[in-house]
Image (tube, rainbow, N blue to C red):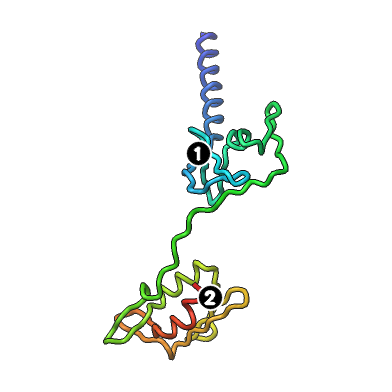
Amino acid sequence: MKKYIAGIFTGIIITAAITVSAATVKQYILTPSTAKVFVNGTVQTEQGQPVLEYNKNTYIPASMLTKSGVLTKNGNNYIFDSKPVAAVPKVTTPKKSAESYLQVINNKNYVRYVDIYKSLKDKGFQFSAINNEDIKAAKDNETIMFYYKDSFYYNGISYIDYDFFVQNIYPLL
């Protein structure tokens, strides 16, 4: 009977230890990056070791940098050489044409406010209300004012004049 109780007690301890250690495991999902790593003007690659991205950070395999001479392995440590390493960001999409924003309503040209808002937001503009009707978009030394009286409302969507957009907003995109 003592062996039976000791066996159950040992099983409980082992089960608890496995459960506790399993709770500390974390998983991260990394995606292949389109960034290229250049060292002295040469693109670096490593077979089976791609450059990865996680949470807007780029991860470069240490073996890629060791092969290129930027890192020197010393036991379990890596020593950086003084050469700069540059990870080239993803290829950006070309700027949309002004015409791609164009909406023709009753033979007049307009641009949807929501399209302007998204494009300016992507460029880092911050929006603030001036009063109950007017809005200001600002970034660094650039400011754009949107006046309610200049807008056009059609089928539940707000629009502004296309010519105003081309002259005042599109150059900032």
Q: From the viewer's perspective, is the residue at label 1 or at label 2 nearer? A: 1
Residue type of the residue flagged with mark 2: Phe
Using the image as rendered, state which of residue 113 and residue 74 is in the foreground. Answer: 74
Query: Residue at position x 68%, y 30% from top?
Result: 73
Q: CA distance from mark 1 to mark 2?
A: 39 Å
Q: Residue furthest left?
A: 106
Could you say where residue 33 lies in the image, as x and y percent from the top left?
49, 46
Q: Secondary structure at mark 2?
A: strand
Q: Which residue is mark 2?
A: 127
- Name the residue at 69% across, 31% down: 77
Residue 24 place in picture, x, y as percent = 56, 35
Q: Earlier in the sequence, mark 1 or mark 2?
A: 1
Q: In the current view of this chain or complex, which residue is farthest to the front?
A: 41
Q: Position of residue 89 (x, y in %)?
A: 54, 53
Left or right placement of residue 148 versus residue 82 in this view: left
Does 147 sit above or below residue 8?
below
Disc 1 residue type (three-letter): Pro
Where, by quadrant of the figure, is residue 112 drawn?
bottom left
Which of 11 and 135 lies nearest the eye of the viewer?
Answer: 135
Secondary structure beneath label 1? loop
Which residue of the protein is positioned furthest toward the bottom in this rendering? 149
Q: Is residue 126 above or below residue 20?
A: below
The label number, if any, that marks residue 50 in the structure image: 1
- State the residue at coordinates (61%, 49%): 86
What residue is rendered at 39% in x and 85% in y? 161
Q: How many marks?
A: 2
Question: In terms of depth relative to the viewer, which is nearer, 164 or 7?
Answer: 164
How busy is the neighbourhood of tag 1: few (under 14 within 10 Å), some, or many (20 plus)? Answer: some
23, above or below 130, in the image: above
